[in-house]
Amino acid sequence: MICARFESSLVGFLIGLSIAGGSGYYYLLDEYHTASNLLLSSVEELQKSTSKVHDYAQKIERVEDELKALQESAATTDQVKELRSEVRKLYDGLDQQNLELKAVVWNLEQDIHSLLNGNQKNS
């Protein structure tokens, strides 16, 4: 009888041990899955952030290239001053030609006026 009690105690102990071990294993497995899912979501967020940073870096490179192209095609202050002086020279030349043309037209008007007055006196 003692032997039967011992055997039943041993069987009960082993069953309890198996249940406790299985419960512990299930708990550890559940924690492992939870940690894995958290790690996976963190990796996905990191990948999205990395992609955004990469996109921003490409945008910055494009803006830098556009800025460099604009700087190369933009006129310098000296070029603007030189162009301004050339335009002033052109305007001065045009004004001079305009004055000369006005003088010629005025002389023609005077000649026509004197011819018309001379013809009227002769008639």
Image (spheres, rainbow, N blue to C red):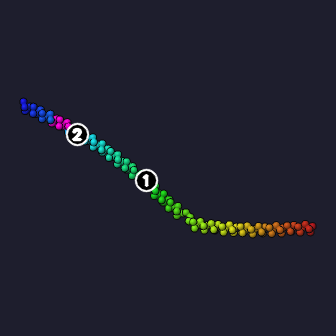
Compared to residue 24, the image places residue 84 above or below, namely: below
Instruction: Tell me the tag on residue 24.
Output: 2
Question: Where in the figure is residue 76, as x and y percent of width and height?
Answer: 56, 65
Number of labels in the image equals: 2
Residue type for callout 2: Gly
Q: Earlier in the sequence, mark 1 or mark 2?
A: 2
Query: In the image, 17: left or right of 58?
Result: left
* Between 55 and 6, the one nearer to me in the picture: 6
Name the residue that disc number 1 marks: 55
Instruction: Tell me the amino acid under the disc marked 1.
Output: Asp
In which quadrant of the rendered image does the C terminus lie? bottom right
Tell me: residue 21, above or below residue 115. Answer: above
Q: Is residue 16 magenta?
A: yes
Query: Circle 1: is it few (<14), some (14-19), or many (20+) Cα within 10 Å?
Result: few
In percent of width and height, residue 11 lies at: 13, 34
Q: Residue at x 62, y 66 (%)?
A: 84
Residue 97, horizontal then vertical, whole percent = 72, 68
Above or below, 59 relative to 25? below
In this rendering, position of residue 15 left or right of residue 51: left
Residue at coordinates 63% horizontally, 68% vertically from top-left?
85
Q: Which residues are magenta?
A: 14-20
Q: Quadrant of the N terminus?
A: top left
Q: Are marks 1 and 2 in contact (CB under 8 Å)?
A: no
At mark 1, the secondary structure is helix
38 w.r.t. 75: above or below: above
Relative horizontal placement of residue 102, taking residue 48 as reference (left or right): right
Residue at image x 20%, y 39%? 21
Q: Nearer the viewer, mark 1 or mark 2?
A: 2
Where's residue 122, x and y in %? 92, 69
